[in-house]
Image: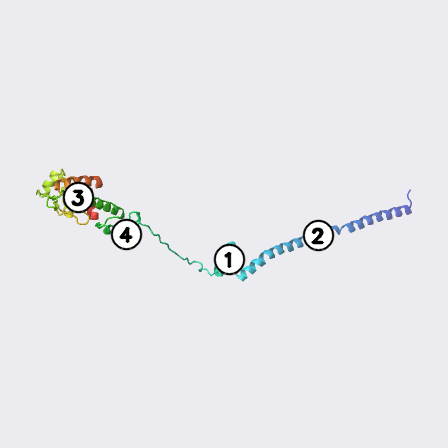
């Protein structure tokens, strides 16, 4: 049987153990508070760091805007370019300076103008060679006219040189002119020209020679009804109207495709 003293001693021991546990519990209770303070400190540090980064970004940008400094790469490059232009004393931005150049085309070996020379230069050269240039002629066609005139001149010189001299010392030249008579319709029919083309032929011949078989261009040497150039191209010397028209038919067909084509070219250019 337990005595009262033992009971009190046991009870006191039990209370002492409870008190010890309670004390230890109270002593351990502040630990969560320390963890909370650490988390709070970390949160404050993170907030300060974020604010620092934000200030580092915003403060220079705000200052740049306040001072008028370009905020973009394009604006920065543009500002640098303007500063360079101002420092080099160049023309203001947006203003362009235009220049020009000239090319001197040298004459060809024979003294004729360069193939790309202007029409005016070619006309002046042709006239200096005694060649009449019709109105409307192109630059590319002038060399052909000059060559034909030179060929005609050479043929005329050869024809004159081949004429026999009289016993009295004077040179007698056989007349190349046509004296056989006839009418335009007779000549065109004899030359084999279709009646459907007579209107074209009449228009061209009327403007070239007025239907005069002996018409001669004093400057170029072109001769006959159609003003053949050179005159020596026409069989019989060029003045026979039938031979002149026969040669012209081949010329019109070869160069313009037909008498109608020749007529169209003549009305547009006033020569053929």
Q: Quadrant of residue 63?
A: bottom right
Say the numbered circle drawn on residue 38. Answer: 2
- The image shows residue 20, relative to residue 250, as above or below, that is below
Q: Secondary structure at mark 4?
A: helix
Q: Could you say where residue 272 lies in the image, as x and y percent from the top left?
A: 20, 45
Say the numbered circle drawn on residue 161. Answer: 3
- The image shows residue 29, relative to residue 66, as above or below, that is above
Residue in the picture at 73% in, 52% down: 34
Q: From the image, state whether disc 2 or disc 3 is nearer to you.
A: 3
Q: Quadrant of residue 100?
A: bottom left
Q: Nearer the viewer, residue 161 or 85?
A: 161
Report how far apart the C-alphas of labels 2 and 3 lie in the structure: 131 Å
Report how far apart the C-alphas of labels 1 and 3 lie in the structure: 85 Å
Sequence-first tag of 2 and 4: 2
Report how far apart the C-alphas of labels 4 and 3 lie in the structure: 34 Å
Task: Name the residue that disc number 1 marks.
Answer: 80
Residue in the picture at 62% in, 56% down: 52
| For the residues bearing labels 2 and 3, Cβ distance under 8 angstroms | no
Q: From the image, state whether disc 1 or disc 3 is nearer to you.
A: 3
Q: Alpha-carbon neighbours of circle 4 within 10 Å: few (<14), some, or many (≥20)?
A: some
Q: Is residue 8 left or right of residue 184?
A: right
| For the residues bearing labels 2 and 1, Cβ distance under 8 angstroms | no
Say the numbered circle drawn on residue 121. Answer: 4
């Amino acid at each position: 049987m337990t005595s009262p003293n033992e009971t009190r001693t046991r009870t006191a021991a039990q209370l002492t153990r409870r008190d010890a546990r309670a004390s230890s519990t109270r002593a351990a209770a502040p630990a969560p508070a320390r963890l909370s303070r650490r988390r709070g400190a970390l949160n404050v540090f993170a907030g300060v760091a974020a604010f620092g980064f934000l200030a580092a970004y915003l403060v220079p940008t705000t200052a740049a805007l306040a001072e008028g400094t370009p905020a973009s790469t394009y604006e920065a490059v543009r500002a640098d370019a303007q500063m360079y232009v101002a420092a080099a004393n160049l023309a203001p931005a947006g203003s362009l300076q235009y220049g020009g150049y000239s090319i001197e085309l040298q004459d060809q070996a024979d003294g004729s103008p360069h193939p790309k020379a202007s029409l005016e230069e070619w006309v002046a050269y042709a006239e200096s060679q005694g060649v009449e240039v019709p109105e409307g002629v192109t630059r590319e066609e002038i060399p052909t006219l000059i060559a034909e005139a030179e060929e005609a001149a050479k043929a005329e010189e050869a024809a004159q040189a081949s004429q026999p001299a009289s016993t009295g010392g004077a040179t007698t030249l056989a007349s190349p002119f046509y004296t056989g008579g006839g009418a335009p319709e007779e000549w065109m029919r004899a030359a084999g020209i279709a009646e459907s083309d007579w209107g074209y032929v009449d228009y061209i011949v009327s403007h070239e020679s007025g239907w005069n078989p002996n018409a001669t261009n004093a400057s170029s040497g072109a001769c006959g009804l159609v003003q053949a150039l050179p005159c020596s191209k026409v069989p019989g010397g060029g003045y026979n109207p039938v031979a002149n028209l026969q040669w012209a038919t081949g010329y019109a067909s070869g160069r313009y495709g037909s008498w109608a084509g020749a007529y169209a070219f003549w009305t547009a250019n006033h020569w053929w």
